[in-house]
């Protein structure tokens, strides 16, 4: 798969500002583009700590049984790591829900948990969303949370699933993680 050089250049531009105290949020959405910020947002360092929620180990009904959820998340991180010269340090957490928009918890989370918070966060989305906490003065990202939609639905309301084996009629989980990690890095 070829990645446009524009993506590589954009990611490289997002990686070198210092962190600040006042934070704002930007939530990704396929349907409602975020307003442009004065500064491009980016991580202040090339090493980013990511916490996998334990929910990745016990997928719910939104994930096809026997899907390699953890492998999909790790492969997506590895793609961005090699593409953007970023080092991801992964740890595990019992946290299952994204931070509320009003206050981050300092943990950059990837979750697939079926919680009220994650369901409400994903109501305007079909696959997933990312919430990024950043300093509006410097553009420095302090935290970013990714939530895979716990209740994905088709236009007719039918329940949909994610898979990692290319099953027809499912969303590709690895592609979804890869897309959302782009938002985690500061891409629109």
Image (tube, rainbow, N blue to C red):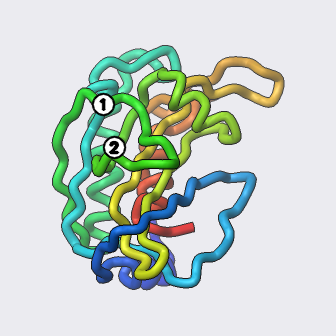
Furthest-front residue in this view:
22
Badge 1 element = loop
The image shows residue 161, relative to residue 130, as above or below, that is above
170 shown above or below 158: below
Measure the C-alpha gap from mark 2 to mark 1: 8 Å
Pick the front one: 53 or 12: 53
**Residue 68, above or below 91:** above
For residue 188, side relative to residue 91 (left or right)? right
Which residue is at a point 40% across and 84% down the rendered structure image?
13
Residue on which disc 2 sits: 109
The x and y percentages for residue 179 are 50, 54
Residue 149 location, quadrant:
top right
Q: Are marks 2 and 1 in contact (CB under 8 Å)?
A: yes
Q: Where is the C terminus found, in terms of image quarters?
A: bottom right
- Looking at the picture, tell me which residue is in the foreground, 162 or 43: 43
Residue 115, position as x, y percentages in the image: 48, 22
What residue is rendered at 60% in x and 23% in y? 151
Say which quarter of the image contains residue 69.
top left
Element assignment for label 2: strand
Left or right? Give the position of 34 relative to 156: left
Image quadrant occupied by the N terminus: bottom left
Total numbered circles: 2
Of the two numbered discs 2 and 1 on the same chain, state the one appearing first in sequence.
1
Residue 116 image offset from top left, x and y in percent: 53, 23
Q: What residue is shown at x 70% (from left), y 40% (from top)?
A: 124
| Marker disc for residue 76 | none
- How many residues crowd mark 2 within 10 Å: few (<14), some (14–19), many (20+)? many
Residue bearing the label numbered 1: 95
């Amino acid at each position: 798969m070829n990645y446009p050089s524009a993506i590589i250049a954009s990611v490289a531009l997002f990686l070198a500002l210092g962190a600040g105290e006042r934070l704002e949020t930007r939530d990704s959405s396929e349907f409602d583009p975020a307003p442009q910020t004065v500064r491009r947002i980016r991580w202040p360092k090339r090493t980013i700590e990511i916490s996998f929620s334990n929910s990745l180990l016990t997928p719910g009904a939104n994930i096809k049984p026997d899907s390699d959820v953890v492998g999909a998340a790790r492969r997506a991180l590895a793609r961005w790591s090699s593409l953007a010269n970023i080092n991801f340090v992964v740890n595990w957490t019992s946290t299952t829900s994204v931070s509320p928009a009003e206050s981050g918890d300092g943990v950059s989370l990837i979750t697939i948990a079926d919680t009220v918070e994650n369901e409400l966060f994903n109501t305007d989305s079909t696959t997933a969303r990312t919430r990024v906490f950043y300093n509006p003065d410097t553009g420095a990202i302090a935290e970013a949370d990714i939530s895979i939609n716990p209740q994905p639905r088709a236009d007719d309301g039918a329940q949909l699933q994610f898979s990692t084996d290319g099953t027809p009629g499912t969303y590709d989980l690895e592609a979804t993680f890869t897309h959302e990690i782009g938002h985690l890095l500061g891409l629109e």
